[in-house]
Image (spheres, rainbow, N blue to C red):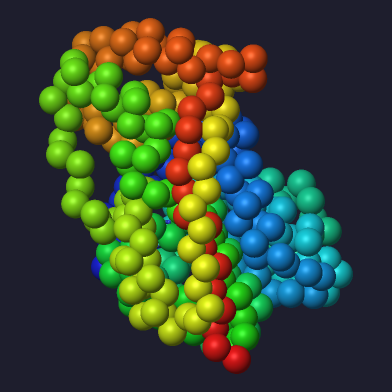
Amino acid sequence: MAAGDNADQIDYWNGEAGNKWVRHRESQDRMLAPLGALSLAAAAVVPGERVIDVGCGCGDTSLALARQVVPGGRVTGIDISVQMLEQARQRAGAKPDLPLSFLEADAASHGFPQGEADVLHSRFGVMFFNDPHAAFANLAGALRPGGRLAFICWRPLAENEWVREPLAVAGRLAELPPIPPPGTPGPFAFGDRDHLVSILKAGGFSEHDIAPHDRPVVMGGSLEEGLIKIVENSPVSRALADAEDEVRARVADAVGDAMQAYMTPEGLTLGTATWLVTARKPG
Ligand SMILES: C[S@@+](CC[C@H](N)C(=O)[O-])C[C@H]1O[C@@H](n2cnc3c(N)ncnc32)[C@H](O)[C@@H]1O
């Protein structure tokens, strides 16, 4: 795959970040499932449709979509992470009857067959483009006239308790890198609603609906499970990437203490704030 504009993200998702997503896949999917349920419901896929799952990662939503398009439809998961795609292909291999395949390519620049897809879907996989306006224009090319877009993405970090609270604890013990300016490729790139609207417009999408959703998610069935995710595979681990082991260990202890306040009968439960975005390619 040509690295193009998204070389940094391609390196990132093919490095330790991709390995961690694979390692924590089941727990990660349990956490994200209730949020993915929102984007899947918004996509409202029906049998026979051709769907592209953008930034499909380990394939959880691609599998769900593939169950919805039978008979007659087809789902393609696209991602840049070799190891996450390998995981997705293994999972799909266990369901050989599903019309599902995966593509290793940069969704921002991939030469999709033009005008063939009915639906573009994504669960947290579209916020990593260096030039999101161009990327969404490219994605729109894949859709047929009248085709639908449905995705879920994070609102600003400050509204997302699941990151804000552990980061606040970490920030008292370690010098953290500055929070990237709004719009920087990364989980919170689409936090600003106006920025999101400009991206959808650049893609030529109409009928946008950008709805805020606030809901708690279970980060782990136990404090330990949730903590491993926070410290190893979340924006907190990104912020601690350059910290020394000893600092990281102290942060983990302190975050563990602070997180006890968020234990519920279901497990470690913190608030999330997302945008559920739907739009249509003019028919
Ligand atoms: C936060 S993960 C979400 C993965 C998956 N959708 C899920 O919900 O489990 C973001 C995903 O987007 C992928 N990604 C980032 N930039 C991409 C690009 N330019 N083209 C395709 N996939 C990309 C990453 O490799 C990663 O798998």
Q: Is residue 83 above or below residue 67?
A: above
Residue 111 x/y as whole percent: 46, 81
Tell me where residue 191 sits by quadrant.
bottom left
User: Is 242 positioned to the left or the right of 167 in the image?
Assistant: left
Left or right of residue 43: residue 57? left
Of residues 192 and 33, the one drawn nearer to the viewer in this rendering:
192
Residue at x 41%, y 66% (from the top left corner):
106
Q: Residue furthest right?
A: 71
Residue 279: percent from left, percent from top: 54, 73
Taking the image as drawn, is residue 155 in sight? yes
Q: How many marks?
A: 0
Q: Can residue 109 be seen here?
A: no
Q: Is residue 217 above or below residue 135?
A: above
Q: Quadrant of the C terminus?
A: bottom right
The residue nearer to you, when weighing 165 against 46, is 165
Residue at point 36% right, 61% down? Answer: 193
Report the residue at 26% width, 58% height from top.
Answer: 183
174 horizontally vs 105: left or right: left
Q: Quadrant of the N terminus?
A: bottom left
Q: Nearer the viewer, residue 216 or 16?
A: 216
Whole-percent x and y of residue 34?
63, 42
- 274 or 256, nearer to the observer: 274
Q: Quadrant of residue 116?
A: bottom right
Rendering coords of residue 180 (x, y %): 20, 47
